[in-house]
């Protein structure tokens, strides 16, 4: 490394340390410049500072700054919140649609239909018998009779298949 490059590296290293950054002692000039730019620290492009008169005459230089981790995290959280809101809206729309469809066919409580108990309905659809204080349940695949209103309700839940 030349003396000029080493002097530039030492200058940038000191500036990084003074700015609260923690560069490695062997970090090169390019990496130090990148760290300072990301941190939003302004520094001179050459090893020698620019004269004040020349600084006034030169056009203003814009320093590119990368987004901080906090800004990136906040944007990610906002995007997740927007996606969650949209998901809730679509679920609410689906529930409303399902409620309107379920109200169309309430079923006749006086009409009896045959149903087959599904795997999901096993242990959930009661027989109506109580043994030792506990209710009995139908097993998967059993074909039983029940009123149409209960059959349609259990079918919407996935407990039975109306035959």
Image (cartoon, grey):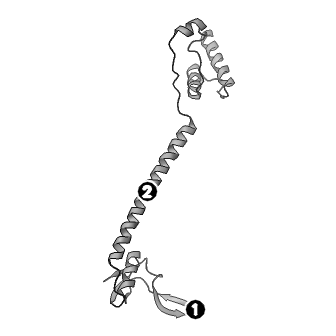
What residue is shown at x 39% (from left), y 62% (from top)? 93
Q: Report crowding for label 1: few under 14, some 14 to 19, many 20 or more residues within 10 A (C-alpha).
A: few
Nearer to me, 21 or 56 = 56
Residue 33, horizontal then vertical, whole percent: 57, 22
Residue 51 visible in rendering: no
Residue 162, horizontal then vertical, whole percent: 33, 82
Residue 91, horizontal then vertical, whole percent: 42, 62
Residue 73, horizontal then vertical, whole percent: 54, 42
Helix or strand or loop: what does disc 1 sit on? loop
Q: Is residue 67 above or below residue 100?
A: above
Q: Check whether the beta carbons of the residues at disc 2 and disc 1 lie within 8 A of each other.
A: no
Q: Report crowding for label 2: few under 14, some 14 to 19, many 20 or more residues within 10 A (C-alpha).
A: few
Helix or strand or loop: what does disc 2 sit on? helix
Q: Quadrant of the C terminus?
A: bottom left
Task: State left or right for residue 127 relative to residue 5.
Answer: left
Residue under circle 2?
Answer: 87
In the image, farthest residue toward the left: 163
**What whole-number distance in Å separates the C-alpha atoms at marks 2 and 1?**
44 Å
Task: State left or right for residue 104 relative to residue 1.
Answer: left
Residue 127's quadrant in the figure?
Answer: bottom left
Residue 139's quadrant in the figure?
Answer: bottom left
Task: State left or right for residue 63 relative to residue 102.
Answer: right
Residue 152 visible in rendering: yes
Residue under circle 1?
Answer: 133
Q: Is residue 75 above or below residue 90?
A: above
What residue is shown at x 65% (from left), y 21% (from top)? 15
Task: State left or right for residue 96 relative to residue 72.
Answer: left
Residue 160's quadrant in the figure?
Answer: bottom left
Q: Quadrant of the N terminus?
A: top right
Q: Nearer the viewer, mark 2 or mark 1?
A: 2
Q: Is residue 19 above or below residue 53?
A: below
Sequence order check: which comes first, mark 2 or mark 1?
Answer: 2
């Amino acid at each position: 490394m030349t003396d000029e490059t080493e002097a530039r590296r030492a200058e940038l290293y000191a500036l990084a340390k003074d700015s609260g950054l923690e560069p490695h002692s062997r970090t090169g000039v390019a990496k130090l410049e990148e760290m300072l730019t990301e941190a939003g620290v302004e520094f001179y492009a050459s090893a020698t500072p620019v004269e004040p008169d020349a600084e006034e005459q030169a056009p203003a230089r814009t320093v590119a700054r990368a987004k901080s981790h906090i800004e990136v995290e906040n944007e990610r959280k906002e995007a997740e919140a927007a996606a969650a809101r949209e998901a809730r809206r679509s679920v609410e729309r689906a529930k409303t649609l399902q409620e309107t469809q379920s109200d169309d066919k309430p079923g006749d409580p006086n009409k009896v239909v045959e149903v087959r108990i599904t795997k999901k309905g096993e242990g959930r659809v009661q027989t109506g018998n109580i043994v030792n204080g506990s209710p009995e349940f139908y097993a998967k695949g059993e074909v039983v009779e029940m009123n149409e209103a209960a059959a349609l309700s259990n079918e919407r839940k996935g407990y039975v298949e109306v035959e």
